[in-house]
Image (cartoon, rainbow, N blue to C red):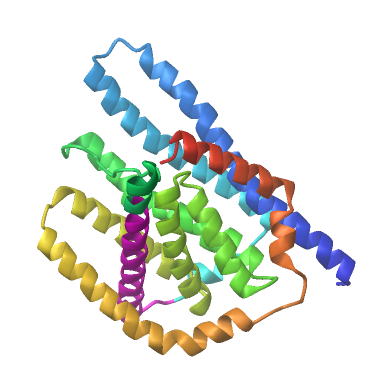
Amino acid sequence: MNEFSLWQRCKSDFNKCTGLLLIYTFLSFVLGMGLGSFIGILPLSFLQKLVLMMLAVYLLSLFVIVIVFLIGKVWLKVPLTKCLRSKVSFKTLGLSTAFMFGTSFCVAYFVNLVNLLLIQLFGISMTSSHFDLGPFNFYTFLILIYVVVLGPLFEELLFRGLILRTLDKYHRGFAILISSLLFGMLHMNLQQGIVTFAIGCVLAYVSLKYDTLLLPIGMHMINNLVAVLVTYFSWPLLWVLFYLFCVVMMAILLSKEERFIHRLFQKEYCTYPYGKLFFNRWTTILFLVVFVLMAVLGWGQ
């Protein structure tokens, strides 16, 4: 493949990656508005409508991400079969998950400090979402199936499967950072998005290192499960000890992985300025505008 053809393929792939997220955002907004209006006219009590709306939001999210994944599978033509057959040991899963929790805790702590500083100095705050499913019942159980199982599965197939491996054809470090940036931005919430970006970097890193999707899928499911457990079980001392243990494990593993991380980010397939090209794409610019509007107006997840 000559340089011109490679350049054209690169631009096309970048447009498709951010185009998928634009489709996700558009479908979520339009279908969400329509569904909300429909539930609003139903002859139900306010509480019944609230429960139904909560359930509908998660079912809609599942429907949209499945549709976007199927579109991406056709557009990007990334073979995922091998990545879904790779064997992952419980030791690797445990260590990688501890690394992820340690990273997310450190980043979340830093973001909270910045948020407090912004409130004290300027009276402004980064929009933050609060994960609260309410009392456990049958509807909550259905939501948990999405939050802990189906959501992580399809998000990993889309981001660490299609998008990460499409971008990995050009530069590995670029692929990890950009796929994680898009993953964070999809939440349309600045504070949550920064933490999600950090988690995405860890998931992308282990996915490429071990050439598997099973590992990030399992880690993502565990992450969401812990978020649910923290919501339902108020054991502050236990959770503090858990996250401190993960921070220590992160520091140990980071020292051991330093050489591999350096090699991973130095691996290049060609020399084009991919970062500049990616952010010059009209799809990327439009998605950035949508993200800013959603984050400012507090419409994120």
Q: Is residue 157 visible?
A: yes
Q: Is residue 291 left or right of residue 143?
A: right
**Residue 249: where, in percent of width, then height?**
29, 80
Above or below: residue 41 compared with residue 171: above
**Residue 2: where, in percent of width, then height?**
89, 72
Tell me what residue is drawn at x 55 percent, y 85 percent.
262
In depth, the one of 63 and 128 nearer the eye is: 128
Q: Is residue 52 magenta?
A: no
**Can you say which quadrant of the picture contains the C terminus?**
top left
Q: Is residue 96 left or right of residue 238?
A: right
Tell me what residue is drawn at x 83 percent, y 60 percent.
8
Above or below: residue 291 compared with residue 43: below
Above or below: residue 105 compared with residue 234: below
In depth, the one of 239 and 53 nearer the eye is: 239
Q: Is residue 62 left or right of residue 101?
A: right
Tell me what residue is drawn at x 37 percent, y 31 percent.
56
Q: Quadrant of residue 237?
A: bottom left
Q: Is residue 80 visible?
A: no
Tell me what residue is drawn at x 58 percent, y 48 percent.
70
Q: Is residue 98 magenta?
A: yes
Magenta-drawn stretch, dominant element (helix, strand or loop): helix
Q: Which residues are magenta?
A: 87-115
